[in-house]
Amino acid sequence: MYTSELPVTITDPLNRLLPFSSSPYSAFERALERHATHPTLEPTYNPALLARAPALSADIAHLLQVDESAWKMHPIHTHLCKSAPGPLTDYVQRINAVADLPDPSALLAHSYVRYLGDLSGGQTIRHVLAKAYDLDEASGLGVSFYAFKELRSSKPANQGEMKRIKEWFREGTNKAGEKGIEVKAAVVEEAKTAFNLNAGLFSVLDLEEHFPEHELDAAPAEKTFPISQVLSVVTAICLAHFALVLTGFTGNNGYEKLLAAEQWFAAVFSQTK
């Protein structure tokens, strides 16, 4: 049984972000599994490599200090989800609607926006969050969401391997573009929708609207960042997703945007040291 004296708080951006991220990831990964053999989706379908929902669940449980099977019953989660925010409902409903279309090719957009964002900026975010929340980055506890395995083994992926994974994903995405102009147009348009849904979801986490500024900028404990500083890095995740879809999802121009996003993440991290 839980007590009212919780070891973590609702005002903490990470404890708000992770539970709200869980529903969209679970929804679109279930949809991808449902359409795993679809010709547009099959080239990039690799749940052993990419699936984030299991790691996200493990991180939430660790941060809330409960068993993984029990985190959805935790007071923080039940409080946040007592009345599901509109942006969260919209996101999940959109994923389910696309999954129910006669041609679910547009699901690739959600993979592209989410997975390439995680692969590109995840390592930086992982390091920042581990320091901000005094987590053991080496063990991965609490930050396993941002850890990927190698493309062809179960070993942890280093930066070089992460680049290979992104190249593999890019090749699979380009194969989808070869299915015809209508498929490509549908995926590009859905990528724009996916960003807007991400932006709406993040608006729910805008703590500055709901809590006094002094609470966000309170002096951090030793070896941590101020919460407002961590929040700015989390914002960068959403903005980087948008950078990935500005110029379409095939060709060198799109890949250059991906590289630019990676450099931007490095710049953001250098400013938060």
Image (cartoon, rainbow, N blue to C red):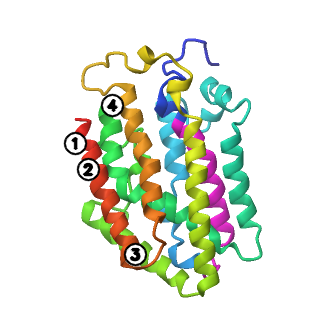
**Region in magenta:** 17-39
In the rendered structure, which disc, 4 or 2, sits on the residue that comes first in sequence?
A: 4
Q: Identify the element where label 3 is drawn.
A: helix
SS assignment for the magenta stretch, majority: helix
Disc 4 packing (10 Å; few <14; some 14–19; many ≥20): some
Q: Identify the element where label 2 is drawn.
A: helix
Q: Are marks 2 and 1 in contact (CB under 8 Å)?
A: yes
Work out how far the residue at label 4 is from the one at label 2, CA to CA, in angstroms.
Answer: 17 Å
Q: Which residue is at a point 57% across and 38% down the rendered structure image?
A: 203
Percent coordinates x, y for residue 201 in the rendering? 59, 43
Q: Amino acid at mark 1?
A: Ser
Q: Identify the element where label 1 is drawn.
A: helix
In the rendered structure, which disc, 2 or 3, sits on the residue that comes first in sequence?
A: 3
The residue under label 3 is: 168
Q: In the rendering, which numbered label is found on residue 132? A: 4
Q: Quadrant of residue 226?
A: top left
Relative depth, front residue between 235 and 102: 235
The residue under label 1 is: 270
**Residue 192 appears left or right of 267:** right
The residue under label 2 is: 266
In the rendered structure, which disc, 1 or 4, sits on the residue that comes first in sequence?
A: 4
Q: Amino acid at mark 3?
A: Trp
Q: For marks 2 and 3, give the one nearer the viewer.
A: 2
